[in-house]
Each structure stands twice: as structure tokens, then as C-alpha cells.
Image (cartoon, rainbow, N blue to C red):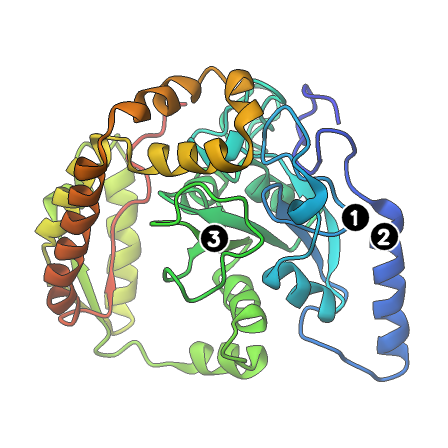
Amino acid sequence: MPRTSASASVCTPTRAGRPEQARAVAAAADAAFSAGVTVGPLQGLPVSIKDLFAAAGYPCFAGSSRRLPADPWERDGPLVAALRRQLGVITGKTHMVEFAFGGTGHNSHWGAPYNPWDPAAHRAPGGSSSGAGVSLLEGSALLAFGSDTAGSVRIPACMTGTVGLKVTLGRWPADGLVPLSPTFDTPGLLARSVCDVAYGFAALDPAGIDPVGFIARAGTRDLAGARIGVGDPFLWRDCDPGIAETAHEAVNALARAGAVTREFTLPEAEAAYTLFLQGSLSAIELRSFLDRELPDWLAQLDPVIAPALRDAESLSARDYLARIARLRALARSAAPRLDAVDVIASPTLCLTRR
């Protein structure tokens, strides 16, 4: 797909997708519907998948300049297999930052899709799942598979005006995803609405949730007494004009519907972010994967991400383990604070100018 296209989102670097495979699955879904058979809640729904999901019949590049080995990266992982069992229609693979290491959507090898909200100017779609949100808005998917290590689902959802879900670490299997940082990696979903994300989550969750019942219960839930934590300065700091105000308007709308807002601080979040800014944790885990599995890729990395992966060599094993231990201690400390609220509200991104 041309890099200058305003909708250049769904693709592998070699082909936009596998239209013959998509048509065959769609025809099978239609035939099943005609026979009164439903094999799963995603039957017949168009779904895009980020190009780090292993999927049979689709080359995997993970945003890099070269095709990854077919074994194991062209063999269905658990989530793709669950989608296929339900006769979900894979419409194509979506653009991404190389090896998911970045949040704006930039990719020096393959370019970045245009943010659909401005077809004239090439505005960032967010990353690293850069094509996922775009695929929803251009109409090629109703559900988009992404992954989230440090915002790679939530950032593109915010920047495209869609809805993103990062599931709890370990709830969904990360097998079949090219890893960035196993310490943080989770699969995730994007969709056009909260209801669509909830439906997709229930359809794919290993716990076997009934999506229709799940949505029905959520739609009738009374917000009276729901506790929303707000006010942590760290989570609201340095917002561009209009962002904090808009987020507060949404919280106030929930309060008018019966929710209760509570002043809430989570000092562990700022402490964890300080560790994040020191870098190297995700970088060294990605570097370790490349050294083991794809050593020939190091010389051809996107120049935007290459310096961080080279610098990661300076992190000692002692420092790496100390940072992991610090993060775990912060998580333990934060857990009882989270019992005081049902949800924490904050802006997703503080900037509008891109």
C-alpha cells in the first residue's frame, strides 16, 4: 500500500493482506449463519492484527525490514487460533513501530499511516500499534489486535479517538507475539466503542465469558456508588490546554450519573515512571531476544530505536535485577491503595501537538 495513502494502515510490507483467505473465511461464516450455526461470537467480524502476531498464511515482519522466520512466526498463536476457531475474518496485518519500541508510530522502514482525522497532513497515529486504530476508522476492521508494553494500545487509541484495552499482565497468553519486554508485554484490543472492546474481550478471554451477557450486565449496571479516583498530580501534570478540562468533564458526567469521585494519589506510579525514564529495562529485554533469535537484525534496526538497544549493553545484570525488584516492591505497595477505588481517571496523553 503506498506510504502516501491517507489510509495506509492495513498491510504487511509485502502484501496488503490475504484477500483470498479473508473471502474464504467470510464465505464460511455466511454459510454457517445460513445453516443456523454459530461457532463463536466473532463469527464473520472483520479483524485486523498487528504485525507482531504470528498467524499462519501471513508473513511476520514486526515492523522490521526483513521477514521473520516462518517457524515460529507464521504459526497461529493462542489468540489468533481463538479468532480463527470463531470464524473471525482477518482482514490484514497492521503497521507498527519496529519491534514495538516506540509510541508515535514512526517507522523508517515502512513509513507510518496517516491519522485519519487529518487526511491532508501526515499526523502521528500513535504507536506502537500504529495501524490498529487507523484500521478501525478507515473501515477495514471492527476489532483490532494490538499489543501494549508501555502504552502501545492506549496511545494509538487516544490519538485516533478509539478505545483501547491493555489486559492485566498474564491474563491473556503472550505466546505467538514477537516479544518486546516480557516484564510488561500484554496483548490488547482496540475498537470504536467501549461496548465493542468489551464484546471482543469477552469473546477472546480464556475464562470463557459470554459476550452478550457480559455487555447486557455492563449496560444495566447502576453507577451509584462507583468510586472514581482523581486528583493525583502526577497523572494530570503538564497537560496541553483543553486536555485536563475535557477529562474532568467526562469524570463529572459519570458523577452526575451516580459515581462518587474521590481524591486519590498513587505515589508508586511516579516512582515507577522515574525508573521507566532511566530506560534500559525494555531495551535490554528486546536486545536479549534479538541476540538469541535474530542476531542478523541488529545491523539493520530503525535508526530511531537502534541507539537505545545499543546503549542497553551498559546495563549490568545487578542493575537490571535491582530495577525489577524495585518495580515489584512498588506494585506490592500500590495494591492496598487500589482497594479504595474502582477506577482511576486521568488523561491518556498530555499533548495535542504532533
Question: Which percent across, then down, holds residue 163?
Answer: 47, 53
- Above or below, 3 relative to 229: above
Residue identified by numbered label 3: 163
Q: Secondary structure at mark 3?
A: strand
Disc 1 residue type (three-letter): Gly
Say if mark 1 contacts mark 2, CB within 8 Å.
Answer: yes
Disc 2 residue type (three-letter): Gln
> Residue shown at 36%/29% (left/top)?
352
The first of marks 1 and 2 along the sequence is: 2
The first of marks 1 and 3 along the sequence is: 1
> Residue shown at 62%/41% (left/top)?
51
- Above or below, 257 relative to 2: below
Taking the image as shown, residue 232 lies to the left or right of residue 287, namely left
Taking the image as shown, residue 253 lies to the left or right of residue 152, namely left
Image quadrant assignment for residue 31: bottom right
Residue identified by numbered label 2: 21
Which quadrant would the C terminus be assigned to in this image? top left
Q: Residues within 10 Å of mark 2 (few under 14, many from 20)?
A: some
Q: Nearer the viewer, residue 244 or 106?
A: 106
Question: Which percent across, then down, holds residue 317?
Answer: 23, 37
The answer, for residue 15, to whether it is visible in the render is yes
Q: Nearer the viewer, residue 18 or 37?
A: 18
- Above or below, 261 relative to 121: below
Q: Nearer the viewer, residue 254 or 101?
A: 101
- Above or below, 222 relative to 234: below
The answer, for residue 126, to whether it is visible in the render is no
Q: CA distance from mark 1 to mark 2?
A: 8 Å
Disc 3 residue type (three-letter): Val
> Residue shown at 70%/53% (left/top)?
75
- Mark 1 against mark 2, which lies toward the viewer? 1
Taking the image as shown, residue 21 lies to the left or right of residue 157, namely right
> Residue shown at 10%/58% (left/top)?
264
